[in-house]
Amino acid sequence: MTYTATSGRMVQIAVDWFDPGRHPDFVEWVTRQNGQGLATWLPAGEYPDLGGYPDVFVGVDPSFSGEGTDSGMPDPYWSEVVQAARDGVGDTNGLHAIVWIRPDPDL
């Protein structure tokens, strides 16, 4: 077995984007990508709701140029994800930064 520790290359952001009334474009994107390779706790085909675990995990390229595993996410969401990675992760030593997007229970 081989493993590599990648501590410090992930940032978690808590957002209100899972609210379909306020952010229908984001919710539609998650719904469309779920089961198509999107990293999430949601079972394939399930609609993200605030009562479950709709967390989403995306990768941002190490140059923070805007490329990444899920760069097809609608703007301005993707721009905020890239900025969070840039601010929260910093140097990635050439590896993608992972951004964990979760609902903020206080929003």
Image (cartoon, grey):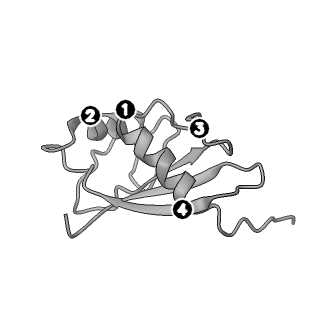
Could you tell me the amino acid type at mark 2? Asp
Front-lying residue, 45 or 49:
49
Res. 86 in view: yes
Residue 68: which numbered mark, if any? 3
Q: Residues within 10 Å of mark 2 (few under 14, many from 20)?
A: some
Relative to 83, residue 12 above or below: below
Asked whether, in this view, residue 35 is left or right of residue 16, the answer is right
Going from N to C along the chain, the mark reached first, 2 or 3, is 2
Could you tell me the amino acid type at mark 3? Gly
In what element is the residue under mark 3?
loop
Whole-percent x, y for residue 26 in the image: 30, 39
Residue 31: which numbered mark, if any? none
Could you tell me the amino acid type at mark 1? Pro
Disc 1 to disc 3, C-alpha distance:
13 Å
Going from N to C along the chain, the mark reached first, 3 or 4, is 3
Residue 74: which numbered mark, if any? 1
Whole-percent x, y for residue 96 in the image: 67, 48
In the picture of the structure, the residue carrying the numbered disc 2 is 25
Q: Quadrant of residue 73?
A: top left
Whole-percent x, y for residue 41 in the image: 43, 56
Q: Are marks 1 and 2 in contact (CB under 8 Å)?
A: yes
Task: Give the residue drawn at x 63%, y 58%.
Answer: 90
In what element is the residue under mark 2?
helix
Going from N to C along the chain, the mark reached first, 1 or 2, is 2
Whole-percent x, y for residue 6 in the image: 72, 65
Going from N to C along the chain, the mark reached first, 4 or 1, is 1
In what element is the residue under mark 4?
helix
In the picture of the structure, the residue carrying the numbered disc 4 is 88
In what element is the residue under mark 1?
loop
Task: Give the residue drawn at x 68%, y 45%.
Answer: 62
